[in-house]
Image (cartoon, helix red, strand yellow):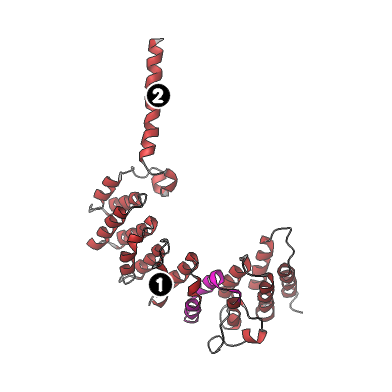
Amino acid sequence: MRRTAVIFAALAVLCAAPAAEAQRRPPQGNRPAGAQNGQHQDMSFREAREALASADASRVSEALEEIAHYPTAESVQAVVELLRRGNGDNVTDKAIETLGLLARPEAIEELSNLLHHRRAAARAEAVESLAKIQDPRVRALIESGLHDSAPEVRSAAAQALGQIGARQSVTMLFRAFERGVPQAAEAIGRLGSAEDAVSADAAHDAEDPRRTSRRQTLSMWITHAPITVLLSGFEQFLNRRDVPAAVKVKIIERLEQRAASAAVRDTLQRWVSSRPRTYAGPDLVRARLAIRQIQGGGR
């Protein structure tokens, strides 16, 4: 009996060790795929911070992955110090991404500096990282990316404004769309009011948006921009619960009357298919009619 008790006690110690180790580590569900698959050994924060000084870029990247699981001001400082030492492009991009994963306001100053980095890829990464931080300073910094010389940065800025819900930025997004930032259409669809989607007056929507003195609507662009680009914005408007059904009816009417095409038909069909089976609102009825009209070649 005594021998059996000793065996059970030893087994209990062995079983408790992994549990204790798990409590010392960040949750596995928050780890990147490589870490979960055992591609590198876990490091403590101290070990990861020391590894940032390594001359081995892969070792530094591994350390950054580990530091991303410790969202503290100290972690931000460690990454900022790494960035200011100068690194290869891959390590720099990884460090900027890590600042976004940490999502700490202490990173804003460094990310704002990185918006002026010599490489467009780094500037775009800085925009995306800023979008992950909840702070009132972020919106204006992301808006500045709409004026960047590189299309990829302007694109990242438009998408980021949509992601953070920057409704105050809709006017700037219309200007960006006019200057050739197609991703602004989807952001407008996410953020804009009903009046930004379509006017109650069809003649208003028939005006040239680049010359009108009146408020721009996305519908104004139907004959002035690729419909496939505009549909990303209209689909966002159609999917929103805060946009009245009457406004959605007008959107569908403008699309059928001024841009009847297979792309419009497929977008409307996808939207119809996504509605609950019990829904029978006027916008759904109008969409089904538009689909039939487009398939039949018009009225």
Label located before the other in sequence (1 or 2): 2
Question: Residue 55 placed where, x, y %?
Answer: 22, 54
Q: What SS does tag 2 mark?
A: helix
- Is 184 magenta? The answer is yes
Vertical order, 161 against 103 (above or below): below
Q: Image quarter for residue 133?
A: bottom left
How many numbered discs sit on the rendered protein?
Answer: 2
Q: Position of residue 53 (x, y in %)?
A: 23, 53
Vertical order, 237 against 254 (above or below): above
Kindly identify which residue carries mark 2: 12
* Dominant secondary structure of the residues highlighted in magenta in the image: helix
Q: Amino acid at mark 2?
A: Ala
* Label annotation for residue 140: 1
What stretch of residues is rendered in magenta?
171-194
Circles 1, 2 touching at the beta carbon (< 8 Å): no
Q: Which mark is residue 179?
A: none
- Circle 1: is it few (<14), some (14-19), or many (20+) Cα within 10 Å? few
Could you tell me residue 191's position as x and y percent? 54, 70
Instruction: Identify the residue at horizontal 57%, vertical 75% (top origin).
Output: 230
Quadrant where the image shows the C terminus: bottom right
* Residue 96: x %, y % from top left: 34, 61
Image point (69%, 73%), residue name: 246
**How far apart in space, not on screen, are marks 1 and 2 (Cα)?**
56 Å
173 up-or-down from 26: above or below = below
Q: Is residue 91 above or below residue 261?
A: above
Q: Quadrant of the N terminus?
A: top left
User: Tag 1: residue type?
Assistant: Ala
User: Does the magenta segment cover residue 26?
Assistant: no
Which residue lies most toward the front here? 136
